Image: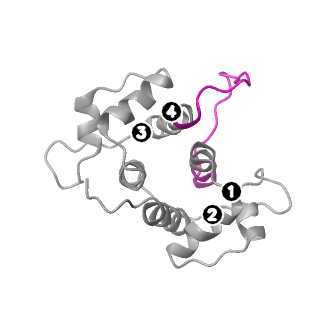
Amino acid sequence: MQTNDILFKLKTALSLENEQIIEAYKLADFEMTEERLANIMKRRQDKGFEEATFEELGVFLDGLVLLKRGPSDKVANEDDVVELTNNLILKKVRVAMELKEPELVILFALAEVTLTKRQIGSLFRKEGTKNFKACSDELLNAFLEGLDEFYYDGEEI
């Protein structure tokens, strides 16, 4: 999936205002301007559209965790460079929104994807372990659609 699509779907699903997104970036010590955010939230065909980088998506997800849950007591190792995969995106959103396995089963079901708790658990295992399953773009998209349905409050943004 495209980084812009993921950011837009998260903004829509969680009913986030631009100010909240910029606050998430600030919490993660990243400078995001209102203009840049507006440009990466535009549709591809719109004038001024800019592609969001994987770094911007990753930093936003880190900031979202801080925005929703507050700072962690754990000391993060800033030197580690982690590749942003679909599995990591799922994990960061799960942590930020404090989603448990039963809720994840519901989220996927809302997007008409049937997964067992065991199958969902395999998406959150460490890569390289026996039961790890890579998250496809289709599965990530279904998760984001289910998230949108799950948190839909009846109002349009």
Which numbered dot is residue 100? 1
> What SS does tag 3 mark?
loop
Task: Check contact, mark 1 vs mark 2: CB within 8 A.
Answer: yes
According to the picture, the residue beneath numbered tag 3 turns out to be 53
Disc 3 crowd rating (10 Å Cα; few below 14, some 14-19, many 20+) is: few
What secondary structure is marked by label 1? loop
Q: Residue at x 75, y 62 (%)?
A: 122
Task: Name the residue carrying label 4.
Answer: 67
Looking at the image, tell me whether mark 3 or mark 4 is earlier in sequence order.
Answer: 3
**How far apart, in angstroms, are the residues tagged by discs 1 and 2?**
6 Å
Q: CA distance from mark 2 to mark 3?
A: 27 Å
> Magenta segment: does it hold 85?
yes
Query: Which residue type carries mark 2?
Result: Leu
Judging by the rendered image, the residue that carries numbered circle 2 is: 104
Mark closest to the chain's N terminus, 1 or 3: 3
Query: Where residue 28 sits in the image (x, y, percent)?
Result: 51, 25
- Please give the range of residues in magenta: 68-90
Q: Residue at x 74, y 25 (%)?
A: 74
Which amino acid, mark 4?
Leu
N-terminal of the pair, mark 2 or mark 3, is 3
Q: Secondary structure at mark 2?
A: helix
Q: Position of residue 99 (x, y in %)?
A: 63, 53
Cβ atoms at labels 4 and 1 below 8 Å apart: no
- Please indicate, yes or no, whether residue 133 appears anywhere in the rendered image: no
Q: Which secondary structure class fits the magenta region best?
A: loop
* Amino acid on which disc 3 is placed: Thr
